[in-house]
Image (spheres, rainbow, N blue to C red):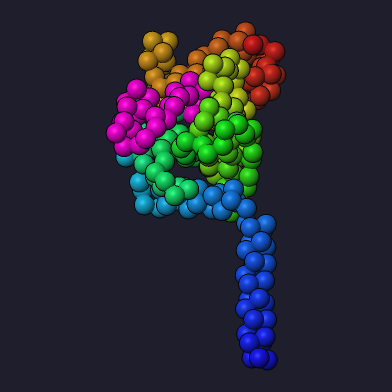
Amino acid sequence: MNWSWLALAASLALVAVLIWTFVRTSSVYPKDDLLAQEVIASHVRSLMANHLTDIPSSDRHTVKPWFNGKLDFSPEVQDLNAQGFPLIGGRLDYLDNRPVAALVYQRRQHFINLFIWPSTHDADRTRKPLMRQGYHLCYWTEGGMTYWAISDLNNAELQEFVQLMQNPASATPSPWPSAQDDADLALRLNEPQSEPRTSAAILTGDSATSKLSMRRMLLSACCRPLQKASCPMPIAVSHNPCW
């Protein structure tokens, strides 16, 4: 009889320990945090294996149809090239125990993985930023779809990317030069020019170079009347009184 009571007590104690462990693990590692670890692992794996895309293309009308027949949903693909986030392509990935779409965008030398799959929540969830292992992440739910964005890009620019994804109608290029443009221009102003570039050559060049070259020409034209007195304008061209 005593052995029976001891066995019962031991069984109850074991059950209590298991329940306590499960509750503690669930509180310390909620589902979103565990999913964040999966997202990080997929992002790192895509960079390490040099397998960012299954369909390399900057054309959203090429990337979006590629997913047809490969997934049970159709991911929304935005063209953000004019806003400084060019589309690189897409691929299939596996998260949250299901196949998902992975769209790849780029910001300078930084890659952004955007994972998309159908949501299990009826209501939309506002975006929530996270930082794990040096990566910035942001996830939200909208229109019955779950979105996870991850990059080693700084958080401000990742949030800019997320905002553009959430509000594609407002995705218009900024008319003002960025601080990065000013820094690039300052460097180029100090570099010797191998040969003069005509306005036609500038207009047919790449977007970033065209902008910088055109601004350089305007800056030179602005400063030319002041050459005898040396142009006193600061490096930050966006705040230059000549503009």
In-front residue for pair 209/194: 209
In the picture provided, is 78 more to the left or to the right than 241?
Answer: left
Q: Residue furthest top?
A: 225
- In the image, which residues are magenta? 60-85
In-front residue for pair 15/148: 15
Query: How many circles with numbers are drawn on the protein?
Result: 0
Q: Is residue 66 above or below residue 113?
A: above
In-front residue for pair 107/193: 107
Q: Quadrant of the N terminus?
A: bottom right
Asked whether 28 falls inside the magenta stretch, the response is: no
Q: Residue furthest front?
A: 1
Residue at the image position 68 percent from the left and 91 percent from the top = 2
Residue 128 is at least partly visible in this image: yes
Residue 121 in picture, x, y percent from top left: 56, 37
Residue at the image position 59 percent from the left and 39 percent from the top = 138
Q: Main secondary structure of the magenta part?
A: loop
Residue 101 in picture, x, y percent from top left: 41, 38
Q: Is residue 84 above or below residue 219?
A: below
Q: Is residue 206 above or below residue 57?
A: above
Residue 87 is at least partly visible in this image: no
Residue at the image position 50 percent from the left and 15 percent from the top = 214
Q: Is residue 221 above or below residue 233?
A: above
Residue 63 in picture, x, y percent from top left: 35, 29
Residue 118 in picture, x, y percent from top left: 47, 36
Q: Residue furthest bottom?
A: 2
Asked whether 64 falls inside the magenta stretch, the response is: yes
Residue at the image position 61 percent from the left and 17 percent from the top = 176
**Residue 67 occupies quadrant:** top left
Q: Quadrant of the C terminus?
A: top right
